[in-house]
Image: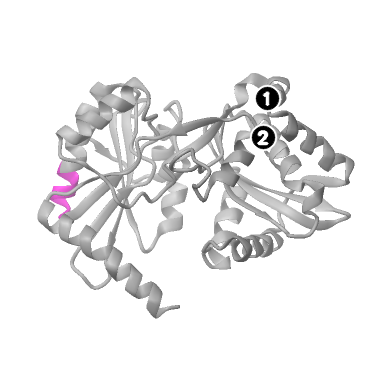
Amino acid sequence: MPLFDNDPARFDAALLRFQRPHILQSSQWAHFKAPIWSVQRQVWGDEASPLAAASILTRKLGPLPIRIQYAPKGPVVRPELAAWHKVLPELEAHARASKALFIKIDPDIDAESALGRALIALLQQRGWVFSADQVQFRNTVLSDLSVGEEMLLASMKQKTRYNIRLAGRRGVVVAPSGDFDTFYELYAETAARDGFLIRPRAYYLQVMRTLQRAGMGQLLLARVEKAPVAGLFLFRFGPTAWYFYGASSSQGRRNMPTYLLQWEALRWAMAQGCTTYDWWGAPNELDESDPMWGVYRFKEGFGGRFTRWIGAWDYAPNRMLYRTYTGAMPKVLDLMRRRHG
């Protein structure tokens, strides 16, 4: 049986005992999701040497008496199939006891590893279904920072190394910053140019200010002659840094600021003791027709390894109701989008 530990500090301490805990499982991330989502934290095994841990978020669907649950990038489990045999029945029981429509999990388990293949088979055997709603990026690019700066540079494509040096010659300067408003303006410009939706300014400012103050994040801005031309915000938890938010201006792109910016982000992560840099997002399929292909080619140039996680899986106590929900929700969301332009 899991221990219910709603003490944020103790739960995070338990998470940090795993090899690669995810920041989306941290108590700080659950805090950002309140009050829309409530949180329940569970730890399996001894807190000093936990078997697994899960931060489970729960929300109601508007006025409907329906609850959905999600363990973002969790649960975090020892890399042993036996541990999953213990944890999955507990998660299923939790969903049933709390009368949830479903519980969603999407742990960072390599789908092509022996554990990943065995876990997928176990999930299918137990009645979990591969979710039509993949909330997070299923695929990513990972850079191994443990090799050090020299080997990291050597693993990059020649053009990437050239552009890093070119940015420096053309006067691009990258430095840590607390100017979150300037970064948001760059981010909004990027979203308008590239056609993706972003949250309100207040959300990003809260996330960035809180994480940077807690030592769990860092804003880096690239400038040319003191004018901001690009920026990124890194998340950090345990041995991993994540490149979540990136932005660039249309001005000064010929100076290749994003190349030097990413190099300094990699160096910052190494200085913090991180051993993995997660580039957070890659194409569903490695094909030039994929809309993320250009982004992937940029990330790949830094020598990272394409990684496909097992993705998001749902367990529904009432399968008929779940099928009704998954069939109706795309139509409801489409109607909402059309109504609001």
Left or right, 251 with reference to 77: right
Callout 2–callout 1 Cβ contact below 8 Å = yes
Question: Dominant secondary structure of the magenta stretch?
Answer: helix
Q: Give the residues drawn in magenta, as a range.
A: 93-99
Q: Position of residue 264 (x, y in %)?
A: 73, 38
Left or right, 223 with reference to 281: right
Give the residue pinned by disc 1: 152
Q: CA distance from mark 2 to mark 1?
A: 9 Å
Dot 1 crowding, Cα within 10 Å, few <14, some 14–19, many 20+: some
Q: Quadrant of the C terminus?
A: bottom left
Lower sequence index among marks 2 and 1: 1
In the rendered image, is residue 216 in sight? no
Secondary structure beneath label 1: helix
Q: Amino acid at mark 1?
A: Leu
Q: Residue at x 63, y 63 (%)?
A: 193
Along the line of sight, the residue nearer the viewer: 47 or 325: 325
Where is 19 relative to 286, above or below? above
Q: Residue at x 17, y 53 (%)?
A: 98
Where is 166 relative to 152, above or below? below
Along the line of sight, the residue nearer the viewer: 323 or 51: 323
* The label number, if any, that marks residue 266 in the structure image: 2
Q: Amino acid at mark 2?
A: Leu
In the rendered image, is residue 34 in sight? yes
